[in-house]
Amino acid sequence: MEEAALVSALADRLAALPRVRLAHLPTPLEPLDRLRAHLGAAPRLWVKRDDCTGLGLGGNKVRKLEFLLAEALAQGADTVVTGGVVQSNHIRQTAAAAAKLGLECHLAVMTGRVPRVDPDYNDTGNILLDRLFGAHCVTVDWRADRNAVIGSLMASLKARGRNPYMVPYGGSSATGAMGFVLAAAELLEQAQSLGVRITHIVHASGSAGTQAGLTVGLAALAPEVELIGLDIDAEPDRVRRDVTRVAHEAASMLGMPDMLRDRPITVLSGYAGEGYGLPTNGMLEAVKLGARLEGLVLDPVYAGKGFAGFIDLVRQGRFAADDNVVFWHTGGAPALFAYRSLFASFVVARLDLTQPG
């Protein structure tokens, strides 16, 4: 298919999909000039602010929920069901979206995945907001079969005469990925208006939907842009498999199954540390640098580790002097408060910003 025809067909197929507007879009695209100067970096550095999507304190999941909950409403659902860990950004944003749309929300909240936590980890941050949004939270051990738990919730609700819709874990399905196919187009439009040629996008990758959607969008609209996912789960092979699967399902959903034939899926390891939700020195430095140089709030689980990887790739010289490299900030600020003991010393200890590195 010719490039112009491909772009037109993609736009038409996306426009035909049910969508409910929940996010404040477009989110800002901002330069990271003070970080660039601190790192002594040659390439131009940018941040795509999906922490500014608005609903429920924002985050990238709202883009997915615009398509997923439109599907739920089209099916006549009156209740949504999903699952995630205690400090899940996904279940927080699902609860907020359900409140906005007048849907009942039931959450399977998985405990125990992060072994070393603050004393009030189970009561602050994202989980506090879940309850504030009116979600019904069922607590289950992380080692339990989460699909069985969610299936049981669905069956119980149906037995009570409700019509539940199951939102996939992380919102990561072909339907959810449509939000990030659109997001790729949004970023490219912003870059064009600024006269900037984006060469690379870097982001934290976990449940796969964000990277899958961007993969499809870039394959159609800007195949020259390199997309780099950074594993934050300490499961890079699993993440890569999931991204590949969801991306191909999304391309097929758009009627373009061959779009990804030559598109690489890049998921880099080495930034997750001991595992999901566990701190790393790189993450701690990245959170401090983002806050003190650019006024960015980064969470310790996703964006903080992603930003650490972004900084490391710049320091490695991965990018050329004329490159424009975008860090996609996926949000997650509420989780910062559940990890406050990690940052207690920051109140009195100043980071030395006079020397790079």
Image (cartoon, helix red, strand yellow):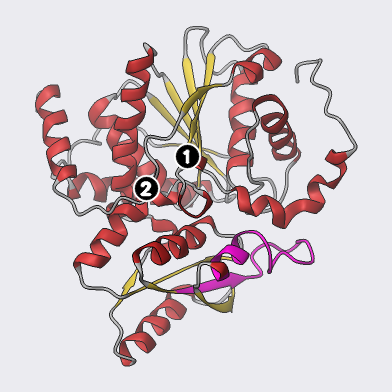
Identified by mark 1, the residue type is Asp
Dot 2 amino acid type: Arg
Residue receiving disc 2: 63
Task: In the rendered structure, find residue 236 and report the number of the disc placed on it.
Answer: none
Tell whether label 1 touches label 2 (CB within 8 Å).
yes
Which secondary structure, mark 1? helix
Q: Is residue 14 left or right of residue 317?
A: left
Q: Write down the region rendered in magenta.
A: 106-131
Q: Nearer the viewer, residue 68 or 272?
A: 68
x then y, percent, for residue 186? 32, 31
Closer to the chain start, of discs 2 and 1, is 1
Seen at 29% across and 24% down, the residue is 222
Q: Quadrant of the N terminus?
A: top left
Is the residue marked by circle 2 packed among few (<14), some (14-19), or many (20+) residues within 10 Å? many
| Residue on which disc 1 sits | 50
Please identify the quadrant where the C terminus is shown: top right
